[in-house]
Amino acid sequence: MSRVEKLYNKAKESPNNLSFSDLCLLLEKVGFEFKRQKGSHRTFKHPQIKNIDSIQEIQNVKGKAKAYQVRQVLDKIDRHNLYRGRE
């Protein structure tokens, strides 16, 4: 099982308990690029997605990712089939 699959499965199994750093890593592993940070919010953009789904903002709350943002990321990964074939 690849690192991406492990992170994906961890997020899927427990979106309420995913660390912020793991969510950032998952985003980067599926092709999102870090664009900017303002306070506790980080913005990522996927260069190959051409609609509003290309942008994802996530928030660090005491080292944890917000569960609804984890679910948004998982939804984008599934809709655009982003984790297949990634290491």
Image (cartoon, rainbow, N blue to C red):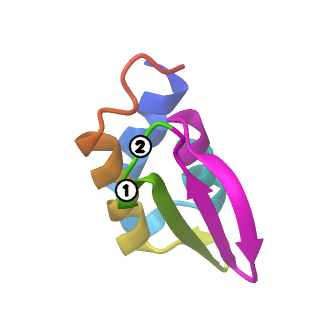
* Residue 42 located left or right of residue 79: right
Please tell me whether mark 1 sits on a helix, a strand or a loop: helix
Q: Position of residue 6 (x, y in %)?
A: 45, 33
Image point (70%, 80%), residue name:
40
Q: CA distance from mark 2 to mark 1?
A: 7 Å
Image point (41%, 62%), residue name:
70
The image quadrant where one finds the N terminus is top left
Is residue 58 a member of the stretch shown in magenta?
no
* Residue 26 located left or right of residue 85: right
Q: Position of residue 68 (x, y in %)?
A: 36, 73
Report the magenta residues as a range. 27-47
- In the rendered image of this protein, does residue 34 appear above or below residue 20? above
Q: Position of residue 67 (x, y in %)?
A: 39, 71
Tag on residue 82?
none
Q: Residue at label 1?
A: 53
- In the rendered image of this protein, does residue 60 appear above or below residue 19? below
Is residue 37 a member of the stretch shown in magenta?
yes
Q: Amino acid at mark 1?
A: Asp
Image point (66%, 68%), residue name:
42
Residue 74 vs residue 63, the one in the foreground = 74
| Rendering quarter of residue 28 | top right
| Rendering quarter of residue 37 | bottom right
Please tell me whether mark 2 sits on a helix, a strand or a loop: loop
* Residue 66 located left or right of residue 39: left
Residue 53 vs residue 19, the one in the foreground = 53
Q: Residue at label 2?
A: 49
Kindly indicate whether the residue at mark 1 contacts the one at mark 2 (C-beta within 8 angstroms).
yes
* Residue 47 located left or right of residue 37: left
Q: For label 1, count other residues whose C-alpha is less than 10 Å away and answer few (under 14), some (14-19) or many (20+).
A: some
Residue extending furthest front?
50
Q: Amino acid at mark 2?
A: Ile
